[in-house]
Image (cartoon, rainbow, N blue to C red):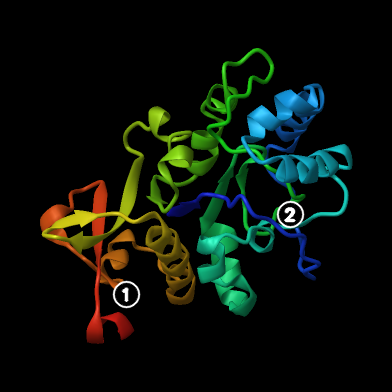
Amino acid sequence: MRIILSPAKTMRTEDVILSKTVPVYLSQAEKIANALKALTPEERRAVWNCSEKLAAENEVRLAHMNLHGAVSPALYSYSGLAFTHLSPESLDDDGLAYLQEHLRILSGLYGILRPLDGIVPYRLEMASKFSVGGTRNLYAYWGDLLYEELYRDNNTVINLASEEYSSAVTPWLKEPNRMIHIVFAEEVRGSLKTKGTFAKMARGQMTRWLAETQAEDPAMIRTYRRGYRYEPSVSDETHWVFVRTTGKELAK
């Protein structure tokens, strides 16, 4: 079983004393970095789709980018909501070992990352309008590489990533491999709605729970009760819906 998460736009460099691994597709990442460096500042800002302030910050990052240089583990480098609620700093050694084996973070720059892969701060969303090596976009550039790596010696992926990132994998999906999409929703005026902020938090919380319980059987996920409950009436084989709860259930 593998678990996939999206990266976060906000990043930090953490001097964590851990044995760091090397991203699987580092040479492909270098080609993307070089393609970015070949653009004009105006073209890069369009790719990054950000403010002038953020563009200036990322210009500095890119100018000094050395993918083999000072790096920090991916799990500690992203600081968005999912990673804040995963809270890797407080995981024990068994939890970290579980994530290193089971968790994969998808990335526009690196393609796919294990938690302890050493990375540098960057900005590049998977859906960026950016052509590398003659391809029309990053989805085409990565092709089936992410799929092949995810399903190497594995046939089940638990999707805790956003559609932007899981879409880099799903077009290649074929039997006997399967992907189980986890949907976090809440009841709003009689219907179920997904709210982005709560969903991001829940993705991190569920990833942490999987590490704490050392889950190996996907069916165990349906017992998850940290603020959500599995709702079989609106779920199917590939989409498992968890409905946000209140009151006593929230603390279970």
Instruction: Determine the secondary structure under disc 1.
Output: loop
Percent of width and height locating residue 106: 56, 44
| Nearest to the observer: residue 12 or residue 24 | 12
Q: Residue shown at 51%/28% (left/top)?
A: 144
Amino acid type at circle 1 is: Gly
Percent of width and height locating residue 94: 57, 75
Q: How many marks?
A: 2
Instruction: Determine the secondary structure under disc 2.
Output: loop
Quadrant in the picture for residue 134: top right
| Nearest to the observer: residue 78 or residue 111 | 78
Q: Residue furthest top?
A: 134
Percent of width and height locating residue 51: 67, 41
Quadrant in the picture for residue 137: top right
Q: Residue shown at 82%/44% (left/top)?
A: 61
Amino acid type at circle 2 is: Thr
Q: Earlier in the sequence, mark 2 or mark 1?
A: 2
Evaluate if marks 2 and 1 touch, with contact meaning CB atoms under 8 Å apart: no
Q: In which quarter of the image is the C terminus?
A: bottom left
2 vs 1, front mark: 1
Q: Relative to 67, does residue 77 appear above or below in the rendering?
A: below
- How packed mark 2 is, by other alpha carbons closer than 10 Å (few <14, some 14-19, many 20 or more), is some
Q: Residue furthest front?
A: 52
- Could you give the CA–CA distance between mark 2 and mark 1, rounded to whole angstroms? 34 Å
Which disc, if any, is residue 143? none
Would you name the residue on which mark 2 appears? 21
Would you name the residue on which mark 1 appears? 227
